[in-house]
Image: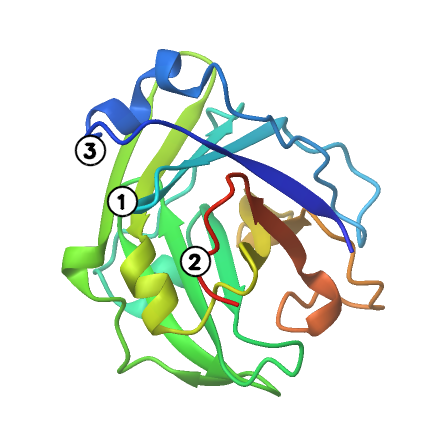
Amino acid sequence: MKEYQVVLIDKNGINEDEILDSSLWENANCLADFSSPWKNDPISKIEFRALWDFENLYFNFRVFDTDIYIDQKDNSIDSIGNSDRVELFFRANDALDPYYCLEIDTSARVMDFKAQPDKNFDFNWDWPKEDLKLSVSKDKVSFTVGGKISIASLNELNLIHDNTIETGVYRAKFSKAENQNYEPTWITWVDPNTETPNFHIASSFGKFVLEGSKVLRG
């Protein structure tokens, strides 16, 4: 299973604006080995970084793509699901019973839901708002989606085991097809080895290892 080392930083009350500050991420490990196993077309570069400080898990996606598609018909789940976005899935166990999903578009709309095997989704479930903060930005070459998730909420959901969080890291990229409809390209950190795109499967997850000596949950 792939592993990503999440660097421990001093607790200093990082706010939402600082989540997008590039200097914050200088000490974080850069995860960039993304692929779309089901297509041969090249994909835009993605840099993912994470940090933590015993109170929060901080994350930052920088995607080197300025051709962004957002379905703006409303703010529904369907609209977010038809938009360019980044995704984090967290599982309590390798049976995926349950796992929790955060799908965030470039306008900071979030589709958060609880899931169980065979794509059994509970869209009535929400990540507690006080435990999830998001920020987005764009520049001439990229867009950035950052956020922080409280360690308390991750523990409450039984997602931390021996300083490890089993996590999927993904991107959905929408492009206009010849029929003028927007079609997705599915991009993942871990190749799930499936014939067709599927992130909702145990083999698409890796491990986030929280650096530091304090055991949070064993």
Identify residue type, mark 3. Glu
Q: Earlier in the sequence, mark 1 or mark 2?
A: 1
Give x and y (percent) for residue 72. 26, 51
Which residue is nearer to you in this view: 212 or 40?
Answer: 212
Q: Which mark is residue 216?
A: 2
Q: Nearer the viewer, mark 3 or mark 2?
A: 2
Q: Is residue 178 visible?
A: yes
Q: Is residue 185 visible?
A: no
Hey, which quadrant is residue 101 in on the image? bottom left
The residue indicated by pointer 1 is 108
Give x and y (percent) for residue 9. 39, 28
Q: CA distance from mark 1 to mark 2?
A: 29 Å
Q: Are marks 3 and 2 in contact (CB under 8 Å)?
A: no
Q: Earlier in the sequence, mark 3 or mark 2?
A: 3
Which residue is nearer to you in this view: 215 or 137?
Answer: 215
Q: Is residue 90 left or right of residue 136?
A: right
The residue indicated by pointer 3 is 16
In the rendered view of the protein, which quadrant contains the N terminus? Answer: bottom right
Taking the spot 54% from the left edge, 65% from the top edge, the residue there is 161
Q: Earlier in the sequence, mark 3 or mark 1?
A: 3
Identify residue type, mark 2. Leu
